[in-house]
Amino acid sequence: MPAASLAAVRSFVAAPIPTRPAVSVESPRAFAFKGVEKRFGDKVVLDGIDIDVPVGQFVAVIGKSGCGKSTLLRLLAGLDRPTAGSLIFGPEAKAGAGEESRTRFMFQEPRLLPWASVVKNVEVGLTGIAAGAEARRRALAILGEVGLADRADEWPSVLSGGQKQRVALARALIGQPQILALDEPLGALDALTRIEMQQLLERIWLEQKFTAVLVTHDVAEAVALADRVVVISEGRIALDLEVPVARPRWRGSVELARLEGRILDQLFG
Amino acid sequence: MTLTQRVKQNGIGWLLPALVIVGWEAASRVGVMPANVLPAPSAVAEAFWRLTLSGELIQNIGVSTLRALAGFAVGGSIGFALGLANGLSALSRGLTDTTLQMIRNIPHLALIPLVILWFGIDEEAKLFLVALGVFFPIYVNTLLGIQSVDPQLVEMGRVYGMDRRALFLCVILPGALPAIFVGLRYALGIMWLTLIVAETISASSGLGYMAMQAREFLLIDVVVLSILIYALLGKLADSLARLLERLSLGWHPAFQNA
Ligand SMILES: Nc1ncnc2c1ncn2[C@@H]1O[C@H](COP(=O)(O)OP(=O)(O)O)[C@@H](O)[C@H]1O
Ligand SMILES: [Mg+2]
């Protein structure tokens, strides 16, 4: 592992994780799905989704492959429209992806432009917000946050998988999104890199206070990171579970293990 | 890579041609190679010097190069524009692609008799043939390049709020560039080939004309000289295209540490 990322790991461990009060039901709404249905032809993928998410909540979405998790995120990000029902956004956010909406999407693949340097890739996240020297300054700053300041002028092809995903995270965060949708962004990473990325994500979420919706197939990841875990099965929300565990969380704790058990029971029981 | 390494690498490519020339000269001197079949390299060099002094060579090279570039500019830009249009718009592709694919199957040199009937042996005839020959490799590869751009990157660009212009300049064009360069290098080859044929059949100036004149007067050294100059010009054009490619595709793994 290069020295830079070792240092980055150390700084995660050493830095005191800021505490903040748990998001309460009284917080203003970030977004809500009201009876949302999505079908492709005859195939009903989402069949009446109701969920209300307050500003700043970290929601994890879990479900078997093909159950419609990506479809749900695409609806949230405005990449697709529901066939029935509606999405309601809070006062600060607007529907649809784009410069004003500030809903950002992080894909399972890094999707970096191979012909643009690392810093230029991060600047893509400022499209329509800032340009030129200002964009570069902000991009370098956020690259520092994800521990890649020294790689700014390299091509993405020389980075490792985890480093590429950190660049993608920087690109998603630089526009200061109100809602960040993450579609299994860590799914392709090895176990150690993954834990490192989870800690990075949690730290930045605690600092920036955006609303996060993380699709994952890793139940341990969901309970470690989220305030709330939603299990989707057969197009509906089968379980909507609060994770009332204080941060920083200890991954081996009994509380988390018990919650993990409940979710696995729901998925396979 | 250091400069000396680069010189070595490029130098090695010239080793074989140099050996051939030395062997050829020796064969001529000994008399194995009769001068009326293939003149000695020294005789060709002499012809080169003679024609350079008279100004004939420079003038003919100039005329041919100008023709090549003019035809390339016309055919290449139409091909590039249509490739872009058909890559970006399904309507444009639906309208024109079938027709173009049909025309593509006609070898463009088969049109020479028709072209002579239309334009005589004037400049337009050469320009038309070169433009037509260059058009297709540029068109086909530009279209292919645009169609092979990763749709996931295009979706990413949309999600991050790029407008059509930004999407084209930052995602689609750079993604299509490697294929466009393949087309460019192919088109340069076709450009010289077409020009040689066109000038050999009908022209009153240019390298091909010079070679045909020399044939009539049995100046075989000048004929060989013309052929060598075509080879050198072709190589020069290809080297320029490669340089351009290396400069603009520095991000491509194939061009790193190369
Ligand atoms: N554009 C589409 N057209 C048709 N079917 C689709 C489309 N997108 C997704 N689907 C179908 O919807 C279902 C859910 O897909 P997806 O949301 O990607 O699942 P997940 O992300 O949970 O694995 C799958 O059966 C998939 O085949
Ligand atoms: Mg998915």
Image: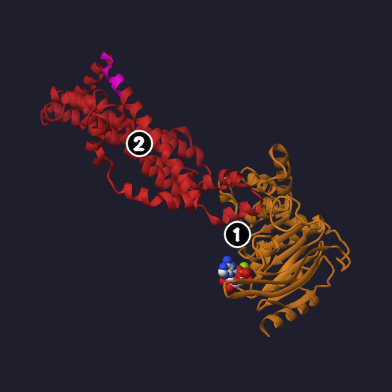
Chain colours: A orange, B red
For label 1, the residue is A109
- Say above or below: B16 vs A158: above
Read off the chain for label 2.
B
Residue located farthest toward the bottom when viewing the structure as drawn? A269
Kindly identify the amino acid type of the residue bearing the numbered disc 1: Glu
Q: Quadrant of the C terminus of chain A?
A: bottom right
Residue lying at 38% horizontally and 40% vertically, measured from the top left: B185
What residue range appears in magenta? Answer: B54-61
Which quadrant would the N terminus of chain A be assigned to in this image? bottom right
Give the main secondary structure, helix, strand or loop, of the magenta stretch: helix
Do the residues indicated by labels 1 and 2 lie within the same chain of the protein?
no
The image quadrant of residue B212 is: top left
Q: Which residue is mark 2?
A: B131
Q: Quadrant of ligand 1?
A: bottom right
Asked if A208 appears above or below B18 in the picture, the reply is below
Q: Nearer the viewer, residue A2 or A197?
A: A197
Residue A190 in the image: state x and y as whole percent: 62, 64
Residue B189 visible in image: no
Q: Mark 1 Cα within 10 Å, few/some/many (few <14, many 20+)?
A: some
Label 1: chain? A
Give the side of residue A32 with respect to residue B257, left or right.
Answer: right
Horizontal and vertical percent for residue B197? 24, 34
Reply yes or no: does residue A165 show up in magenta.
no
Which residue appears at 36% of the width and 32% of the height?
Answer: B71
Residue B220 image position (x, y, % from top left): 16, 26
The one of B34 and B251 positioned closer to us in this rendering: B251
Q: What residue appears at the point 33 percent right and 50 percent down from the top-left corner?
A: B102
User: Would residue B215 appear left or right of A6 to someone viewing this image?
Assistant: left
